[in-house]
Image: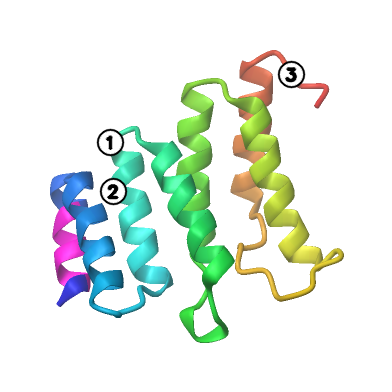
Amino acid sequence: SYRSCLQECFEVGNSDSATEILNAMSHALILPDSVDVQLVVATLCKNKQWQRGLSILRKFANNAKEEDGIVAVEAYDLVLFGMGEERRWKEALQLLALMQQGEEGKGMKKKSFHPAPALSTYHTVLEICVGASQAEQ
């Protein structure tokens, strides 16, 4: 199954194959669910490719339907960790704000498919800001 292949990609850290499988699913008209997306994002982040992971998270959340589920907050935390390694505090704050919007439903025309931030999310963003000397943010 596609999921088994994605799991194998994660275990061996093969991000190129993971993204190829995700693309193959789309071409075969098999829509990935939140678990498939989480596996691909985790594989990308394992290889310090958080930007690609963030792009996939955003694309999934923008196109998701109720039955697709919401990608676990841990996948977002992995992206944030990657941002922190590069001291990308502005991007971290933007992602946190996006997650908070979904949590509160502020002005949302449709349901948000971004997860609500967890305590670990706030902790990671705070560490990124402190590490980048932007604690006042």
Residue type (three-letter) at the residue carrying disc 2: Thr
Q: Which mark is residue 134?
A: 3
In the rendered structure, are the residues bearing label 1 and label 2 in contact, judged by CB atoms less than 8 Å apart?
A: yes
Disc 1 packing (10 Å; few <14; some 14–19; many ≥20): some
Would you identify the image quadrant in which residue 33 lies?
bottom left
Mark 2 or mark 3: name the one nearer the start of the chain: 2
**The disc label shown at residue 124, or none:** none
Work out whether residue 109 can be spotted: yes
3 or 64, which lies in front? 64
Percent x, y of residue 100: 75, 55
Tag 1, which secondary structure? Answer: loop
Crowd band around label 3 with a 10 angstrom C-alpha radius: few (<14), some (14–19), many (20+)? some
Residue matched to label 1: 47
Q: Position of residue 103 (x, y in %)?
A: 74, 64
Q: Is residue 61 left or right of residue 1?
A: right
Q: Residue furthest top?
A: 133
Image color mode: rainbow
Q: Residue at x 74, y 47 (%)?
A: 97
Quadrant of the rendered image containing residue 109 = bottom right
Q: Which residues fall within the magenta stretch?
A: 3-9
Residue 118: image location, x then y, percent: 64, 55
Q: Tag 1 or tag 3, which sits nearer the N-term?
A: 1
| Mark pair 3, 1: CA separation | 26 Å
Indicate whether residue 7 is drawn in magenta: yes
Q: State the mark number for residue 43.
A: 2
